[in-house]
Image: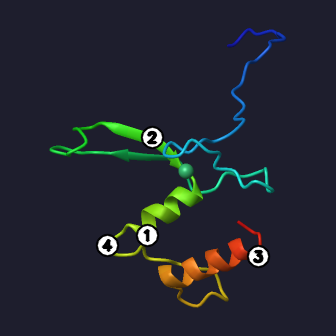
Amino acid sequence: MRISHEEQRVEIVEVVDDIICNRCGESCRHPSLSCNAYGLVEAEVSGGFGARLGDMVRYTFSICERCLEQLFDGFKHPPEITANAGWGEPTWADMKQHITRGEKAGRG
Ligand SMILES: [Zn+2]
């Protein structure tokens, strides 16, 4: 049997104000769409036995979309891309053209 009573408490919670890109230091939020963060947000990487980055060592970081774009540009093999209906099966080159057109139109 539990004996209890009601009690009023003040709770302190963490409120995320921004997600900062670990690479460039800029915000991962879209400049005009303030509600979401884009890119790799609080991604985690950990190594197993013999890992170059350390056995059982976990890294947590965020990378903004612009830095991801630069990272993808440096890939020897471009990332696989899965897109919603209407995009077909785009390649990284297709997406780069889309990004470039958006920047020229002032959307980036
Ligand atoms: Zn960045």
Q: Quadrant of residue 84?
A: bottom right
Pick the quarter of the image with the N terminus: top right
Against 44, is 105 above or below? below
Gap between marks 3 and 1 measured at Cα: 21 Å
Pick the quarter of the image with the C terminus: bottom right
At 43% from the left and 76% from the top, the residue drawn is 80
Q: Quadrant of residue 20?
A: top right
Q: Which residue is mark 4?
A: 76
- Residue labelled 2 has its Cβ within 8 Å of some atom of ligand 1: no
- Disc 3 crowd, CA 10 A, few/some/many (<14, 14-19, 20+): few
Task: Give amino acid for label 2.
Answer: Thr
Q: Name the one closer to the observer, 18 or 76.
A: 76
Gap between marks 2 and 4 measured at Cα: 24 Å
Q: Which circle marks residue 60 in the picture?
A: 2
Q: Secondary structure at mark 1?
A: helix
Q: Nearer the viewer, mark 3 or mark 4?
A: 3
User: Can residue 42 be seen in the rendering of this structure?
Assistant: no
Task: Give amino acid for label 3.
Answer: Ala
